[in-house]
Amino acid sequence: MKIALISKKGGVGKTTLAVLLHEALKQTGTSVAVRDYDAQGSATKALARINGTREVQGKKVDVLLIDTPPSLTLPATPAAVAVADIVLIPTSPSPMDLWEAEETAAFAKAKNPKAIVRIVLNKTRAGTLLTSGVKTALGNTVPVLPMALGDRQAYQQLLLGGWEMLDTQAAKELLQLTVAVTSLRK
């Protein structure tokens, strides 16, 4: 399975989500690797710190996560979408981020009509108007993954030290998100 993480803008959590999914999938015994298309190389840097797995040409894995640059016009993003089985669009519940996510979803659907496209809410806060109003704001245009990631420092800590840096609640939330993502192809 190939999962592309794309967004029109930076700072919404593409790379963080790629590394978090990488670590959660490893916990389930799934072979996983990350292809880092972003020129900043942040996924590569994080994987080096936590003994993660970058893609190796010719080596098969169960799940390949493709981290892309914050742009829809650079060649890496359409290339990632073209080969993806699933396209994830991380976004915060901020209206401006949601508007960009809608445009990104339309782009993904146009480039690869066979791919499953989902918005993944990131940096959410339970009980807030922004988080609870996302589905209303998006209408029926783009499906939102039923599991979201809360605004937790533990996710940033994972980037420094791996899975062991997560508290119990963060680990549980991340595993639930991983099940929601991997269940899309079944």
Image (cartoon, rainbow, N blue to C red):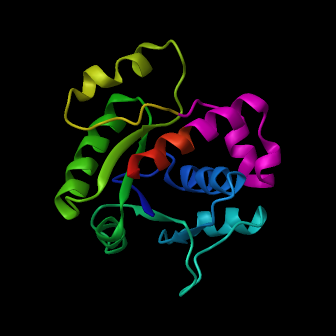
Residue 184 in the figure: left or right of residue 116:
right
Residue 92 in the figure: left or right of residue 169:
left
Residue at 36% x, 64% y is: 84
Residue 185 in the figure: left or right of residue 176:
left
**Horizontal and vertical percent for residue 112?**
23, 63
**Horizontal and vertical percent for residue 51?**
77, 67
Q: Decide whether the magenta segment is chiefly helix, strand or loop.
A: helix
Residue at 45% x, 45% y is: 183
Say above or below: 167 vs 181.
Answer: above
Q: Nearer the viewer, residue 104 or 55?
A: 55
**Horizontal and vertical percent for residue 4?**
41, 60
Say above or below: 13 vs 177.
Answer: below
Question: Per the image, is 158 magenta?
Answer: yes
Q: Nearer the viewer, residue 78 or 172?
A: 172
Residue at 31% x, 24% y is: 135
Residue 74 in the figure: left or right of residue 20:
left
Say above or below: 171 vs 28.
Answer: above
- Quarter of the N terminus within the rendering: bottom left
Identify the magenta region. Answer: 149-176
**Horizontal and vertical percent for residue 89?**
38, 48
